[in-house]
Amino acid sequence: MKTYGRPAAIAVAGLLAVLPACSQSGGGGAAAPAGSAAPPRTGAAGAVFHGGHPAAAGAGDPYFPQLGNGGYDVTHYGLTLAYDPGSGRLEGTAEITAKATEHLSAFNLDLRGMKVLGATVDGRAAGVRQDGQELTLQPRDHLRKGTVFRSVVRYAGTPESITHDHGWREGWLRTENGAVAFGEPTGSMSWFPGNHHPSDKASYDITVTVPKGVQAISNGQLREQHTSGDRTTFHWHQTEPMASYVATVAIGSYDITTSRTRSGVPVVSAVDTTAGVDEDGAVLGRFPEIMQWAEERFGPYPFSSAGVIVDQAADVPYALETQTRPTIPAGIFHTTNVVHELAHQWFGNSVTPRTWQDMWLNEGFATYAEWLWTEDHGGATAQEHFDRNHAKAADDDEWDFPPAEPPTAADISRQPVYVRGAMVIHKIRQAVGDEAFQTLVRGWTLRHRHGYASTREFTAYAQSQTGQDLDPIWDSWLYGDGKPA
């Protein structure tokens, strides 16, 4: 995300203690009596499975402990959405394929502000309970550890946006002619149920039906588009794993351009028809050049499609690195932001932070990409960027906290994470030299391609690959308090 000083504190509902019985919703069959567990079922082989317990209602993130859930890993989301831009009503069906990592009698999904109309697990009606952002499903049959299961949740309503104290919003945001979804860090739970923590990535199929004449843009590749009567349906497919916070849907009126990069990646970009097309077109014209430069710097592009979305999203003064197709408001659509958000396709989207405490790995590298771009294109060198920032007074907010240890959730998108994070990267480059630095960066993006990684994993990798003692950098720049000497 490209906005310095953006607070990200989220008021999260109280932790749900999962009850052994849930209220029944949708489909046939009776719910388990209050206070009792669902009865064990006899499988095809005749064995009765008595095991299982409610999964944790939260992934234990240090800043958002209730975000995400325990007990399972999602492998695929199939989202079927219908949206009415006039009323703002969204109707959805989420098919979630997952693997149980524990014996489960119940499990949770994150969903905020939408009403669940019914749910099934493996084709059988499931008990449903909603409490704040927690949606608890109780399957008829307990789930064995290692079992692959499919949950289907039907839901509807007017999605809520999440508004911060300063007025900036995330989630499902209505625009003059549609909507756009911004998910970082918690907004994705406003428009579909899921395991909304960056450490649980999955492939996606996102199918959106909108009024005829309106377009729906999402992640990945457009598999199908068809019109029936007064409605048009768009089916987008994201093959590579994606964290939910970089999933998006942009609905409205767009000018669509298509091309391919020199390496053969298809590019689909969408520009809001109310934006400044001429100026935006000039920036779009540099996209192939930026892509080629980024591949040379960071390694092979990690996804099967690329592009950008330029939208007139009201009250959104920041861009977001939505996977394969960063979303950038028209008012801040310029080359620097394209470089920053494109760099995130490697740092954040392909190599995803293990927890939100590792945010500096996203933003430090993306900010340093801006410095490298100007250095490689006749502007300020990375050293000049570094010196300019290091010259700031000791009481500047750049030195408020170390980038690897933001004090609260409100701090994970502040200046030290971005700029001081980039300064950490530059200190590594100074210590090891340009050639070893280039090898280190490209090796890092390949080692954790389509996975996730922590700060500890990065520091260990940097030391092992360069053979140098980088502890002084970690001690002063990554974890040290105040302005380093």
Image (tube, grey):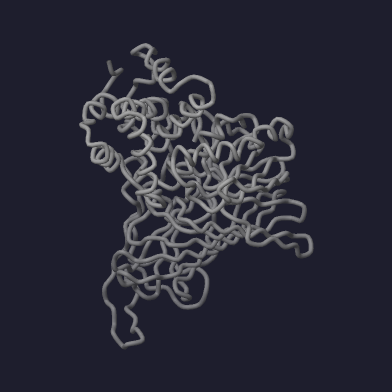
Identity of the residue drawn at 48% across and 56% down: 240
Residue 344, above or below 68: above
Residue 401, above or below 280: above
Q: Is residue 65 left or right of residue 470?
A: right
Q: Would residue 409 be seen by someone viewing this image from the given angle? A: yes
Q: Where residue 330 sits in the image (x, y, percent)?
A: 65, 33
Q: Where residue 151 sits in the image (x, y, percent)?
A: 46, 67
Most foreground residue, 4 or 82: 4
Identity of the residue drawn at 72% across and 48% down: 86
Snapshot quadrant of residue 69: bottom left
Q: Would residue 65 be seen by someone viewing this image from the given angle? A: no
Q: Is residue 422 left or right of residue 47?
A: right
Most foreground residue, 227 or 168: 227
Q: Where residue 402 sits in the image (x, y, percent)?
A: 31, 27
Identity of the residue drawn at 55% across and 64% down: 154
Q: Where residue 75 sits in the image (x, y, percent)?
A: 43, 62
Q: Is residue 227 left or right of residue 69?
A: right
Identity of the residue drawn at 70% across and 46% down: 256
